[in-house]
Amino acid sequence: MGVGGKVKVSGSDPFEKLLDKIPSGARLSEGTAAPLESDPAVPFRIARTRKGGWPVFVERRAAGKTVTIVRNLSGDTGALLAVLKKRCAAGGRAFTDSVEIQGDHRAKVEAILREYGKEAP
């Protein structure tokens, strides 16, 4: 059986032929994803707050709008914005040292940042 109780039909996976080309140590069990921190080419850094927490804040704006803000960024903030917009399914915008995501996504954003584990040296 496949993921979610679905029966796999032989030949339905277009990547089946490529499995023998992947080194055995690099294979992941089905249904798991590679940790994002394994990518050495992450183009941004996130500095922790003075107390050691993630710099994720929620602001309430006019007309009851809520915005999640990630501060203390350096590097390509647009790359982080693209990841957060996709994973949170929300809009947002990037600045030179911060990123804003529409809505209260504090828990999701902190989980994503933990996966990256990127901090300023």
Image (cartoon, rainbow, N blue to C red):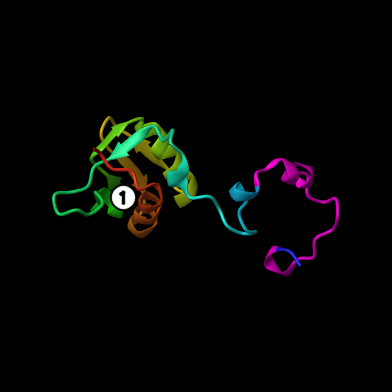
Q: Amino acid at mark 1?
A: Thr
For image coordinates 42% across by 34% down, the residue present is 79
For image coordinates 65% across by 49% down, the residue present is 24
**Residue 18 lies within the magenta run:** yes
For image coordinates 26% across by 51% down, the residue present is 54
Locate residue 98, reporting x and y percent.
27, 38
Q: Could you tell me if residue 19 is visible in this image? A: yes
Q: What secondary structure is marked by label 1?
A: strand
**Residue 84 lies within the magenta run:** no
> Where on the picture, by quarter, is residue 81?
top left
Q: Nearer the viewer, residue 49 or 61?
A: 49
Magenta segment: 3-23
Question: What residue is shown with label 1?
Answer: 68
Q: Nearer the viewer, residue 120 or 104?
A: 120
Locate residue 15, reporting x and y percent.
75, 44
> Where on the picture, by quarter, is residue 2?
bottom right
